[in-house]
Amino acid sequence: MNKLPAQQKGASAIVTIIILAAFAYAVYVGIQYVPQAIESRSVDSVLESVETDQKTNPATTEYDARAKVIRYLQINEMNDMVKNVSVNEFGGKTTIKIAYDRELNLMFKTHQMHHEKTLVLK
């Protein structure tokens, strides 16, 4: 009895190229997204620090609250975020808002990502 040639073992070159292209695209998007996620977590950390500091050493004015936020941003080396901070005082409550936009390039389109974090101090 004659033996038939064995079935192909392993992936073909085209499948390997497709898998590598998908992996490269994931890395490309990840290289852009991960720093944005870290930046967002850092902003959360700044606001949590301000809130914790407010419990022990309350800010008495809008100016004091703004100074706290700017100080924590500078500690985290996020000086470019200072221009995105707005602090408003109304009805005995101080509202701190950090809003900024970032772009995520997906090759086929650019996705605008809006980040907005708000903290209300009593």
Image (cartoon, rainbow, N blue to C red):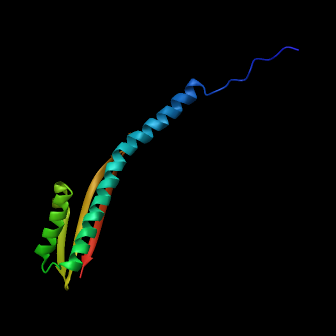
* The C terminus - image quarter: bottom left
Q: Quadrant of residue 80?
A: bottom left
Asked if one can make out residue 66 in the rendered structure from this viewpoint, the answer is yes
| Residue 12: image location, x then y, percent | 60, 25
Q: Residue pushed farthest right?
A: 1
| Residue 25: image location, x then y, percent | 43, 38
| Residue 117: image location, x then y, percent | 29, 66
Tell me if 77 is positioned left or right of 11 in this view. Answer: left
| Closer to us: 58 or 61 | 58
Q: Is residue 26 above or below residue 67?
A: above
Q: How many circles with numbers are drawn on the protein?
A: 0
Tell me if 30 is positioned left or right of 44 in this view. Answer: right
Q: Is residue 17 above or below residue 111?
A: above
Q: Residue pushed farthest top?
A: 2
| Residue 96: image location, x then y, percent | 22, 71
* The N terminus - image quarter: top right
Q: Residue at x 19, y 61 (%)?
A: 73
| Closer to us: 78 or 53 | 53
Q: Residue at x 26, y 76 (%)?
A: 120
Q: Is residue 28 above or below residue 71?
A: above
Tell me if 45 is positioned left or right of 65 in this view. Answer: right
Q: Quadrant of residue 92?
A: bottom left
Q: Quadrant of residue 76?
A: bottom left
| Closer to us: 54 or 21 | 54
Q: Residue pushed farthest front?
A: 56
Q: Is residue 61 above or below residue 24?
A: below
Asked if one can make out residue 109 in the rendered structure from this viewpoint, the answer is no
